[in-house]
């Protein structure tokens, strides 16, 4: 659908919010097609998630050679990853390298938080106000990350605690002294499970406060040997092609047969192979693993047997086995010796299902069963995922309607990229996109490429704006819900559904149809002249 209107001069063509993987690539890509770009970043450097999450043991659960940019053949040939699953410091140094290599820093305003972004309906421009300056832009792109707003629970008395408190997502850059100290860790999601073994190596005693157990598989991390590196680099194009077509953004596919159609010995061998491989791919050993409850029970039984084998105290082992969700329906965790850590004398599992936390006082944590005196309290309590960072910016579209209000009953978008009533605004790896279920870096590239092509299309066709149509948003939300309902995912209370945030509507936020499928849908929409979007030409609304 095409209408016309007249633009006014903006400060820049595009404002990008966030300088993580997505924001950096957006800057690179938009600049390459002649657009002026300004990026705002609250942190003091690039990296986003990998800038903030410096807790001990922070590591990516997707292989480093896949969780890296594919846009530059030179870059992927030059950069040498040292480990199969990169640690946070190595990922951060890679992102810094990319920023320098492509001269990106000159268009990034660091230590600058965007406060408001308001649409001017007469000019179709966005006015973006930060704590430093106000600019206008033709387009506003939110690359604010899916797991970037840390959540610290509101426990009575927290402010009274006399020791140190830290959230894993805001870990001090100088590190935290744990040697000889009594440390409490609240939370046993990915951040807790990665950090607890290392905390236990340093601390005098660690108390692990577990509200819900999670499933974890070995990270399977190893050094990358020279032969592997050479082989990967020689076949990178094919590796990337397979990743883009896959369900999860990595060049691996599930077993060719369904779980129960596979003979028992072969089934066990397949699970064992993925267990040994490590990483989140265990969740996708068989194609029906998070769809069919019987198949899921098989995967659960395999992992639960491993937990009972590793943990010496069987009462503790039983408490470490999740009781409340099918395996893989909360993002499966990957660890280095998490379960074995509970065999140490200086580690105590505090099961909050028996006795919840009541309060915190100057000396430590009080549960309904007793008190735990602590020097350091670590919150590994997760994030207001997918919508949290957007909610914290006052984003207003047509009729000055706030995005937060528009999404009061849950996020609604078309392809995760556009929202009706918010023309010329794009979201990268947000709700309605598959990225959090896949490889975030390739996801960010796919989104940004689509947006960049869209902006080029608008200029070529003399258009000033593009806006998702309400019907397309309704259909996409329905499709996302239908696809999620056909899986076991909605059973689990997880950040995918926002249930970790009090008062947040329980809606399954990602698109679960797979990375390759999603990419094809986006490409078809573009080829069809941005089907489902309204394209606005100069001189009319
Ligand atoms: P997660 O996966 O959201 O885990 C947070 C953990 O904190 C989880 O075990 C929660 O228990 C626990 N939690 C949250 N609030 C409380 C309170 N009030 N009391 C006790 N325990 C609490 O966050 P992560 O940072 O570990 O990982 C996020 C993603 O980053 C991960 O999925 C990977 O994709 C990378 P609950 O399960 O809610 O009972």
Image: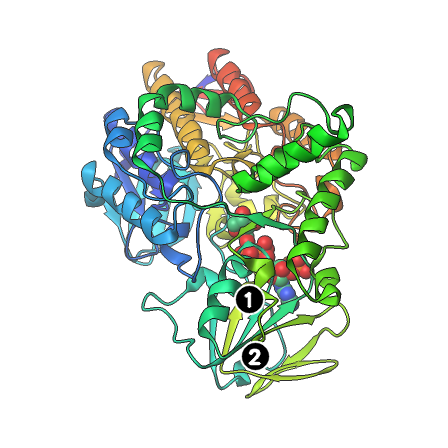
| Residue situated furthest right in the rendering | 294
Residue 393: x percent and y percent?
A: 46, 52
Q: Which mark is residue 158?
A: 2
Which tag, 2 or 1, sits closer to the chain's start?
1
Task: Give the labeled residue for mark 1.
Answer: 152
Q: Residue at x 73, y 34 (%)?
A: 487
Where ligand 1 lies, by image quadrant? Answer: bottom right
Say how many tags the image has: 2
Q: For the residues marked 2 and 1, what is the alpha-carbon distance in whole angstroms? A: 10 Å
Q: Secondary structure at mark 2?
A: helix
**Which is more toward the observer, 356 or 222?**
222
Instruction: From the top left corner, tell me how far across and down residue 275 is, in percent.
Output: 59, 41
Dots 2, 1 in contact, CB < 8 A: yes
Pinpoint residue 74: horizontal percent, then vertical percent. Answer: 23, 27
The residue closer to the viewer here, 105 or 456, is 105
Q: Residue at x 59, y 56 (%)?
A: 189
Check the image and report above or below for 242 versus 326.
Answer: above
Identify the disc placed on residue 452.
none
Q: Quadrant of residue 446?
A: top left
Query: In percent of the image, x 67 and y 41: which residue is there?
Result: 508
The relative height of residue 56 versus residue 504 in the rendered view (above or below) is below
Q: Is residue 11 visible?
A: yes
- The answer to whether residue 344 is left or right of residue 389 is right
In the image, residue 408 above or below residue 430: below
Q: Quadrant of residue 426?
A: top left
Q: Is residue 399 above or below residue 373?
A: above
Dot 2 surroundings within 10 Å: few (below 14), some, or many (20 or more)? some
Mark 1: few, some, or many residues within 10 Å (few <14, many ≥20)? Answer: some
Secondary structure of the residue carrying numbered label 1: loop
């Amino acid at each position: 659908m095409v209408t016309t209107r007249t633009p006014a001069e903006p400060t820049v063509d595009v404002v990008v919010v966030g300088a993580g993987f997505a924001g950096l690539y957006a800057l690179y890509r938009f600049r390459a097609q002649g657009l002026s770009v300004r990026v705002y970043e609250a942190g003091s450097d690039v990296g986003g998630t990998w800038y903030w999450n410096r807790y001990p043991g922070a590591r990516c659960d997707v292989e480093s050679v896949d969780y890296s940019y594919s846009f530059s053949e030179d870059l992927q040939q030059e950069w040498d990853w040292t480990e199969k699953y990169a640690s946070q410091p190595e990922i951060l140094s890679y992102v810094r390298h990319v920023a320098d290599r492509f001269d990106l820093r000159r268009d990034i305003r660091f230590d600058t938080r965007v406060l408001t972004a308001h649409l001017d309906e007469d000019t179709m421009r966005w006015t973006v106000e930060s704590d430093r300056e106000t600019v206008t832009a033709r387009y506003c792109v939110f690359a604010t990350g899916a797991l970037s707003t840390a959540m610290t629970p509101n426990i009575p008395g927290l402010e009274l605690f006399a020791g140190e408190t830290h959230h894993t997502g805001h870990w001090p850059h100088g590190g935290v002294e744990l040697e000889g100290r009594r440390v409490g860790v609240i939370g046993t999601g990915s951040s807790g499970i990665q950090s607890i073994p290392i905390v236990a190596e340093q601390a005098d005693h660690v108390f692990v406060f577990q509200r819900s157990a999670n499933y974890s598989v070995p990270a399977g991390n190893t050094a990358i040997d020279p032969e592997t590196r050479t082989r990967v680099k020689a076949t990178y194009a094919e590796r990337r092609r397979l990743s883009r077509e896959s369900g999860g953004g990595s060049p691996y596919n599930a077993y060719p047969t369904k779980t129960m159609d596979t003979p028992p010995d072969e089934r066990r061998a397949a699970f064992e192979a993925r267990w040994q491989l490590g990483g989140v791919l265990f969740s996708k050993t068989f194609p029906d693993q998070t769809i069919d409850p019987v198949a899921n029970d098989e995967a659960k039984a395999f992992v639960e047997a491993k937990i009972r084998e590793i943990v010496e105290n069987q009462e503790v082992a039983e408490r470490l086995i999740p009781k409340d969700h099918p395996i893989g329906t909360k993002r499966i965790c990957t660890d280095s010796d998490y379960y074995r850590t509970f065999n140490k004398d200086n580690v105590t599992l505090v099961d909050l299902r028996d006795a919840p936390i009541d309060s915190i006082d100057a000396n430590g944590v009080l549960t309904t069963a007793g008190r735990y005196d602590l020097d350091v309290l670590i919150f590994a309590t997760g994030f207001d995922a997918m919508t949290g960072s957007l909610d914290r910016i006052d984003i207003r579209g047509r009729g000055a309607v706030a995005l937060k209000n528009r999404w009061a009953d849950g996020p609604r978008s078309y392809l995760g990229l556009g929202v009706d009533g918010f023309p010329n605004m794009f979201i990268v790896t947000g709700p309605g996109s598959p990225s959090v279920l896949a490889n975030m870096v390739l996801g960010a590239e796919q989104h940004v490429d689509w947006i960049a092509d869209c902006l080029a299309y608008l200029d070529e066709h003399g258009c000033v704006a593009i806006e998702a149509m309400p019907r397309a948003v309704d259909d996409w939300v329905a499709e996302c819900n239908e696809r999620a309902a056909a899986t076991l995912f909605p059973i689990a209370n997880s950040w995918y559904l926002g249930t970790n945030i009090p008062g947040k509507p329980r809606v399954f936020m990602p698109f679960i149809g797979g990375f390759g499928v999603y990419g094809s849908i986006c490409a078809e929409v573009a080829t069809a002249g941005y089907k489902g979007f309204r394209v606005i030409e100069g001189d009319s609304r």
